Image (cartoon, grey):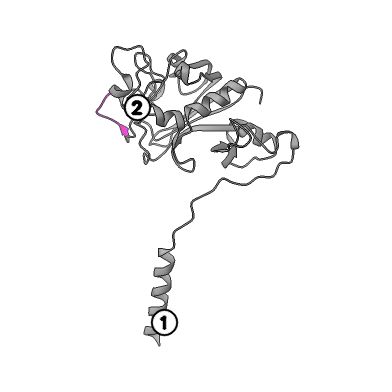
Amino acid sequence: MLLRTFVVLFVLRAVESAVPTKPPRPMSYQPSNPCCWPKPRNCADLYNSGVHTNGVYHVYPFREDQPAAVLCDMTTDRGGWTVFQKRFTGEVDFYRGWVDYKNGFGSVFREYWWGNDKLHQVTSQEPQHLRIDLSDFSGQSRYAKYSFFGVSDAAGKYRASVAGYSGNAGDSFEFVNGARFTTKDADHDTYGNNCAQMFKGANWYTECHSSNLNGLYKHGVTTTYADGMCWLGWLGYKYSLKTSEMKIRPANF
């Protein structure tokens, strides 16, 4: 009898482990304020509709029939942030080409780049703030905030406009202002060589960078120079950070 019970339990557990888990889905929401319902353009619209919980939601940056899932930070600095870059494990390869950065890649439930087309669409609708949250492997954290951030379209090579720094991470996005986006297969920086190839990332490079948040994911102090997930104003070129989140929110939020 004991042997039969053991066999039954073993079979049940084997069946349970063989059943694939369902992939996560964006969270559902019901608005308390009908002004922004049912087609929120960004996470700030969701927040103003009564959604105050962090999570992945559908927003509509292009058209009302074209949803895009994105992580919404509803708690940091009053919430309403649309997260367009998130890294915290190194499980997703960020050393990619132009098309991947144009359309986006990764999982909004884990690590991802939302996509330059979406980033342009949201920033062109109204003026945006930019916030960058960083942490190292010792548990310390810093942030940089900018009072204006915009990205042009693909024809303009996603040229960035950045101004108005505040925070405690140091202004390592200063030279991004006016820069075009560069990937390993599309060189739009102002240096003689391709900065993305040199520093194993993708960024609004100039000659070449003071931040490389799409660089290689390493673990703290590195022996190589400036090719990790670095932020010069905080820990320098030879320290690769543990986490990075880049997010935008309307300036009039």
Amino acid marked by disc 1: Thr
Check the picture and name the quadrant holding the N terminus: bottom left
Q: Is residue 51 above or below residue 18?
A: above
Left or right of residue 222: residue 241: right
10 Å neighbourhood of mark 1: few (<14), some, or many (≥20)? Answer: few
Tag 1's secondary structure? Answer: helix
Disc nearest the viewer among 1 and 2: 2
> Which of pointers 1 and 2 lies earlier in the amino acid sequence?
1
Whether 222 is among the magenta residues is yes
Q: Nearer the viewer, residue 172 or 129?
A: 129
Residue under the image location 44 percent in, 66 percent down:
16
Amino acid marked by disc 2: Gly
**Residue 215: percent from left, percent from top:** 35, 29
Tag 2's secondary structure? Answer: loop
Query: Dot 2 corresponds to which residue?
Result: 201
Which residue of the protein is positioned furthest toward the front in this rendering?
65
Query: Dot 1 corresponds to which residue?
Result: 5
Check the picture and name the quadrant holding the C terminus: top right
Residue under the image location 42 percent in, 69 percent down:
15
Left or right of residue 126: residue 180: left
Is the Cβ of the residue at disc 1 closer than 8 Å to that at disc 2?
A: no
Residue 110 visible in rendering: yes
Q: Which mark is residue 146?
A: none
Q: Is residue 16 above or below residue 134?
A: below
Residue 159 visible in rendering: no
The image quarter in which residue 32 lies: top right
| Residue interval drawn in magenta | 220-227
10 Å neighbourhood of mark 2: few (<14), some, or many (≥20)? Answer: many
Residue under the image location 39 percent in, 29 percent down:
214
Q: Please name the predominant secondary structure of the magenta segment in the image.
A: loop
Q: Nearer the viewer, residue 192 or 140?
A: 192
